[in-house]
Image (cartoon, rainbow, N blue to C red):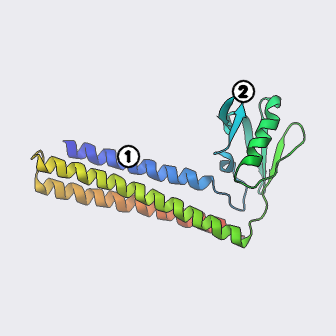
Amino acid sequence: MPVDDLLVNAANRMDKSVETIHSEFNTVRTGRASTGLLDRIQVEYYGQRTPLQQLATISTPEPRLLTVQPFDPSSFKAVEKAIMESDLGLTPSNDGRVIRLPIPQLTEERRKELVKLVRHMAEEGRVAVRNVRRDLNHHLKELSSSSEIGDDDERRAEEKAQRLTDEHIKIIDELLKVKEAEIMEV
């Protein structure tokens, strides 16, 4: 039945939206060191933009320290430059083998800016989930108008779509609540 396929497809797309928001939240800096902070960093390496995780081992030996150990010693300068140019506001120090990134305490003002940022990300996620529902409802209306499904089937499928949407938005709201608490934690 095409309705079940549409619902499964919509659920998968909504799941992807939630996963995307979760990974975006991981790139937002909190007071603690997290290897996810460096996920967005791209390094110019032999003329190619390469994700930092593919060029180095990233670890958190202490709660407020990240270490980056490039596999290729010749890439040290490029890795340092990419970190300096990122929007993270971190200052690398290097001893020739390891790049250390101390994570400074966040100011109250910066915490509030970050909370606004994650709220905006969460809203984008909610909009993406609602767009999936809108597309699904549009397909259901097409099926109904071409008499492939009945009005009752359409209504039931729309109710399922609404439940799916509510569940996924609730997950995004919970992720947001956890991330806001993490950011505001001193």
Residue 12, label in figure: 1
Three-letter amino acid code at disc 2?
A: Tyr
Query: Can residue 184 be seen at all in this image of the molecule?
Result: no
Instruction: Pick whichever, 81 or 23, lies toward us.
Output: 81
Instruction: Using a 10 Å C-alpha cutoff, classify the residue at mark 1 as few (fewer than 14 neighbours), some (14 to 19) or many (20 or more).
Output: few
Q: Earlier in the sequence, mark 2 or mark 1?
A: 1
> What quarter of the picture does the C terminus occupy?
bottom right
Q: Which residue is mark 2?
A: 46
User: Does residue 43 sit above or below 20 in this rendering?
Assistant: above
- Judged left or right of residue 150, residue 128 is right
Residue 77 point in image, percent of width and height: 82, 37
Q: Is residue 141 above or below residue 166?
A: above
Residue 108 coordinates in the image, percent (x, y): 71, 72
Nearer the camera: disc 2 or disc 1: 2
Residue 80 image offset from top left, x and y in percent: 79, 42
Q: In the image, what residue type sits under mark 1?
A: Asn
Quadrant where the N terminus is found in the figure:
top left
Instruction: Tell me the residue at 42%/61% (across/down).
Output: 169
